[in-house]
Image (cartoon, helix red, strand yellow):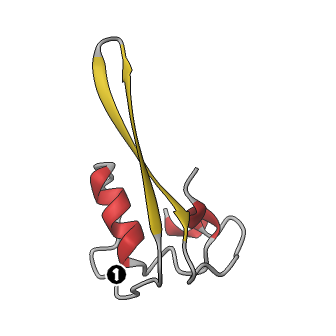
Amino acid sequence: MCICLNCKYINVCKQYFFIEKNHKEKNININAFFNPTYSIINITYFTKSNKLFIEWDMIECLSFKEKPANWISYY
């Protein structure tokens, strides 16, 4: 699970923009300006019904500031 969902910076974070872009999300902030420190993205590959899926999740970030459910205001 991506820790970004509960981060204060979700609306302005360049790494979150990168993750959402790779998820092919349309509701992303193309004006993201915040560069997080030492963020780690986990990429998981899996197949379902002979189709390849890729899951992108931020699992570590030194810039993370907890703000539970902050992603709700993003969408």
Tell me where residue 17 appears, x and y as whole percent: 35, 68
In this picture, is 44 found above or below 38? above
In this picture, is 55 found above or below 33? above
- Residue 49 relative to residue 70: left or right: left
In this picture, is 44 found above or below 9? above
Residue linked to disc 1: 32
- Residue 47 relative to residue 73: left or right: left
Tell me where residue 23 appears, x and y as whole percent: 33, 49
Label 1: element kind:
loop
The residue sitting at 36% across, 59% down in the picture is 19
In this picture, is 22 found above or below 5? above
Neighbourhood count class around disc 1 (C-alpha, 10 Å): few under 14, some 14–19, many 20 upward: some
- Residue 43 relative to residue 50: left or right: right
The residue sitting at 29% across, 26% down in the picture is 52
Looking at this view, name the residue that lies furthest to the top: 49
Pick whichever, 27 or 60, lies toward us: 60
Tell me where residue 40 appears, x and y as whole percent: 46, 66
Tell me where residue 16 appears, x and y as whole percent: 41, 68
